[in-house]
Amino acid sequence: MNYDLLLLPSGAATIADVDDYLGMQQGVGEAAVVAEIAAELNKRNAELPESDTFLGAESVGGARTGTVLHVSCPYDAIGFVRNLLFELATPRGYAVYDPQLAWLIDPAGRVDLAVTHGGAGEFPYLTESLLAQWIPELAEPAPFLIAERGPEQYIQTYRADDGYIVEYRDGSAARHFRHDTADPARAAELIWGWATGAPNTATWTRVEF
């Protein structure tokens, strides 16, 4: 069984209507940008020994799916393939849709950060809509999210039994602060505010190490 990921143009659909958009593209000739991305994926896959290939089929692309590209991969290659799709798709204005999780990872309005999602791995950017979806869904065994700007410059949240622990570090252990909230929307708001440099209105407590 393979894992499916789809590419579609940034801003073309919301999560609520992405299935309708995908249906509208069925039978439409393959877009040039889709053919370009598919060719690069096929090239990189073909360069590897057969035991290391990352596609769930011999090749991708060539289908009448308009502006949509369907990519399948083995489960043990999900992280690698998703990062490769970000590399190829984001500069071309394309979003990554994960139908298993119902996640639309759209680069519109993004802030480029090193993001670690405890349950799903690494991502190259954050958006306000992703935070609004991800934070309430954090769950065991790894209910955390970390966004890093640079060495010792990060913000993170952990979902505890009674709410969310949000911490940020501003360069050193002496500037490490914590805020607790029961509201997932507030946790998302604090993380997005840090990511965008918005004024910080929360009451933070310095963490002693």
Image (cartoon, grey):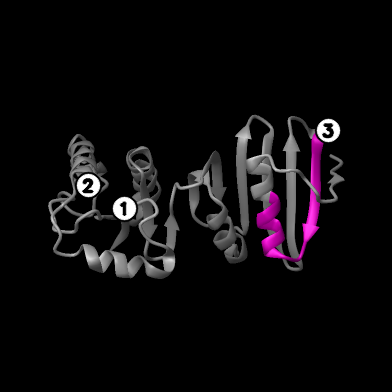
Query: Is any part of residue 101 visible from this angle?
Result: no
Q: Is mark 2 on a helix, strand or loop?
A: helix
Q: How far apart are marks 2 and 3 (CA)?
A: 48 Å
Residue 34: numbered disc: 2
Q: Tell which of 24 and 62 is nearer to you.
A: 24
User: Which residue is the site of mark 1?
Assistant: 7
The range drawn in magenta is: 175-190
Whether residue 185 appears in magenta in the rendering, the answer is yes
Are the residues at dot 1 and dot 2 in contact (C-beta closer than 8 Å)? Answer: yes
> What residue type is disc 3 on?
Ala
Examine the rendered structure and indicate whether residue 29 appears above or below residue 200. Answer: below
| Quadrant where the N terminus is found in the figure | bottom left
* Sequence-earlier tag: 2 or 3: 2
| Residue found at x 27% / y 46% | 54
Q: How far apart are marks 3 and 1 (CA)?
A: 43 Å
Relative side of 192 to 3, left or right: right
